[in-house]
Amino acid sequence: MAIGQDRISIVVPCYNEEDVIAETMKRLCAFARQAEADVEIIFIDDGSSDSTRELIKAFDSQGVPIRLVGFSRNFGHQVAVTAGINLAQGDAIVLIDADLQDPPEVIHDMIKKWREGFDVVYGVRTERAGESGFKRATARGFYRVLNRLSDVPIPFDTGDFRLMSKAVADVLRAMPEKDRFLRGMVSWAGFRQTPLFYKRAPRYAGVSKYPLAKMIRFAVDGILSFSIKPLQLSVTLGMVSAGVALCGIIYALVLRIFTDIWVEGWTALMIAVLFMGGVQLISIGILGEYVGRIYSQSKGRPLYVVDEYFGFPPPL
Ligand code: UDP
Ligand code: MG
């Protein structure tokens, strides 16, 4: 490793990845040896309950610096990646999943683009092999909705597989938000950003650590962290329902005063009551989501708790 070379940090979040981690480390180390740069690989063990952490520590990387941050429990993918970015020493930082869906070899091209002067090189999936039709369809829908709502454009079909320069990483490090939606935060940061197209492989082994409930949470986070349009939507809903209610009131009064068929109308009454109730609950729910975020932000707790560092150089 020559002095004066670029330093690249690779950040890999892992949660119960014992089935793939050895292969991932092998591929990443092979990449590191070929790269014309000093590469450090930072694994974040996001509170795995299997042997992921032991496998990482025991791996013989033959000189490639392997670092490990062990969380005290599962804090979630986005938080794990955040910890990696906070600790990365590199001039450029690459985020990659542990399951080899994103081929490490693509990082060579990312580095090339970075050297051409781009600050963010984000991977765009041209194919998503091995993912269910349901996952693909929901992902497509999600990015479209997100872009309609969000105030910053967030590129379609991107994940967190990307390279960012130190300047962008410094912007992320200065963003204290608890609900983290990294790909949106990177878009928000600005600088020169460019896509890099690649084919997404199937997961090498193991199962997805993003069950449907987590995916929905993630999508809601993405939308609410980048937009207050849902609040505006609830105002619109409120106005429309108030308008409809007003027509109903006039209609009911006219019947009551000018005719004698005023005992009827149970159906209309039920519809109005249920409709108004629905609109109110939705609006309160939307409001609650934002209030909940203010609440968790105001507690000012740290984003994550580390119970082990391994392989980091001693502080100077
Ligand atoms: N992951 C994590 N914490 C979690 C869930 C996932 O660190 O709570 C990691 C996981 O080990 C993997 C990456 O995040 O490296 C993406 O997860 P996964 O491949 O299961 O998601 P999918 O590709 O199915 O969306
Ligand atoms: Mg995956």
Image (spheres, rainbow, N blue to C red):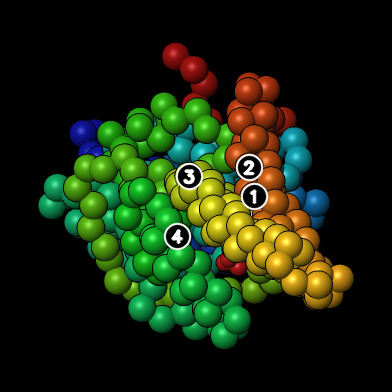
Residue drawn at 23 percent across, 58 percent down: 194
Looking at the rendering, the quadrant in which ligand 1 lies is bottom right
Task: Identify the mark nearer the N-term, 2 or 4.
Answer: 4
Name the kind of residue labelled 1 in the image: Ser
Q: Which residue is mark 1?
A: 283
Q: Which residue is mark 3?
A: 228
* Quarter of the image where one finds residue 251: bottom right
Nearest the eye: 207 or 252? 252
Q: Would residue 146 be found to the left or right of residue 193 on screen? A: right
Q: Name the front one of labels 1 and 3.
A: 1
Q: Which residue is mark 4?
A: 146
Task: Identify the mark nearer the N-term, 3 or 4.
Answer: 4
Name the kind of residue labelled 4 in the image: Leu
Task: Identify the mark nearer the N-term, 1 or 4.
Answer: 4
Q: Name the front one of labels 3 and 4.
A: 3
Asked if labels 2 and 3 touch by Cβ distance under 8 angstroms, the answer is no
How many C-alpha atoms fall within 10 Å of the one at disc 4: few (<14), some, or many (≥20)? many
